[in-house]
Amino acid sequence: MKAKTIIILITWFLFQNETNAQDLIVFKSKDSLNCKILKENNDKYLEVAILVDKNIEIGSINLTEIASIRKEFYVLLNKPKTECLDSIFTNNGELIIGKITEDKKDWYIIYELPNKSKNNIAYSNIKNVIKCNYNSHKSTEKVLPIKILQTNNNESINTVFQNKKYRISLDGIVGMYSGFKTSNFISTPKNYERQLRLNIGFATSIHRAINKRRNILLGVKFSSLYASANAQNAHITTSDSFYDGELDTKLYLNTIGPNLLIKLGKGKSLHSYALQFGINFSYYNEITSISNYNLELSGVAISPSLHFLYDYKMSKNFSLGCNLGYEGGTLTSVLVNDNGNQSIKRLGRTNSINLGRIGLSIGARYCF
């Protein structure tokens, strides 16, 4: 077929009123090209037609230079009367034609291509945006031709949600705690210990990425939990006396230690998930008083932890999130202050204080 005939056919094919799509060829050099594939020789080359300054040019591409081909990737032609598409002009001289589904000013745009695939692009990569008037039915003007891309399209546009190098978080915590062993030293009213099961507190952490993808972060986390119990007209028995009055107990549990955070998935979404592992040091402090009697227990234990995290990105650097997790540990020895008399008591396996707790936290994250 003569070149002139091919040009006539391609011109008719590309500029008819029906919507047609371009093919995308990605090269091994990571450059890419918008074109229409005319002929495929599976052994040697592709014959393609491209638009250059509104002129159609035909050429051949060696198959050894090609990494991948995506057919019908871009809409090139006149917009049909029943459909309205937006135009995004990039800093790379690229024109993306599709439907903008979410526009976060000065941060990113999410758009849908005619093949129904969804992508995102950062505003830092955008030169101009022309939105279609969806209320108008006079969308008959021509869409400008797409220029030859100088970079790999998928790599250039999907960077708005990339992982950051540093992550700082602050959370409020509600947890269920199974400790409290005052009953090892004094008798308490029935169900008194259950009041101390519900804990409230906060946690803060800072992490830094340690790999190229920035999906593995190493850092330190600190948390502080508090619980209290109270009983009126209580009667308790110690090892050498009896006491009556208002019984009050306060429980403090502070934890600090190194943590490893592993982000799940590719991270190119508003939603992100992660697993967090830690080996922490927990400081336990329990203070009970009634009448003129005071009992204080304190100790330190190793506390392993495992948490599942979810974050929702509110802006380029700021996210809101929650995490559900478990922290363990067992206290087998405590420092006892019994009305001013201090001693170290070995609790053994039977009477050890279980520091295990399940917690739910909600908070904010700042990444940069």
Image: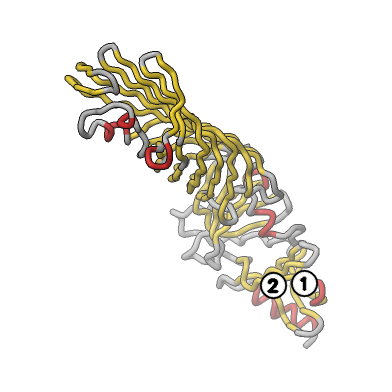
Q: Say which residue appears at 65% left-offset and 70% top-offset.
A: 22
Q: Position of residue 227 (x, y in %)?
A: 35, 28
Q: Position of residue 212 (x, y in %)?
A: 71, 49
Q: Say which residue appears at 25% left-offset and 28% top-offset.
A: 187
Within 10 Å of the Cα at label 2, are there few (<14), some (14-19), or many (20+) other Cα atoms?
A: some
Nearest to the observer: residue 22 or residue 143: 22
Residue bearing the label numbered 1 = 66
Nearest to the observer: residue 274 or residue 219: 219
Residue bearing the label numbered 2 = 69
Tell me: residue 1, above or below residue 296: below
Q: Are marks 2 and 1 in contact (CB under 8 Å)?
A: yes
Residue 101 shows up from this direction: yes
Q: Position of residue 264 (x, y in %)?
A: 56, 54
Nearest to the observer: residue 86 or residue 352: 352
Secondary structure beneath dot 2 equals: strand
Secondary structure beneath dot 1 equals: strand
Within 10 Å of the Cα at label 1, are there few (<14), some (14-19), or many (20+) other Cα atoms?
A: some
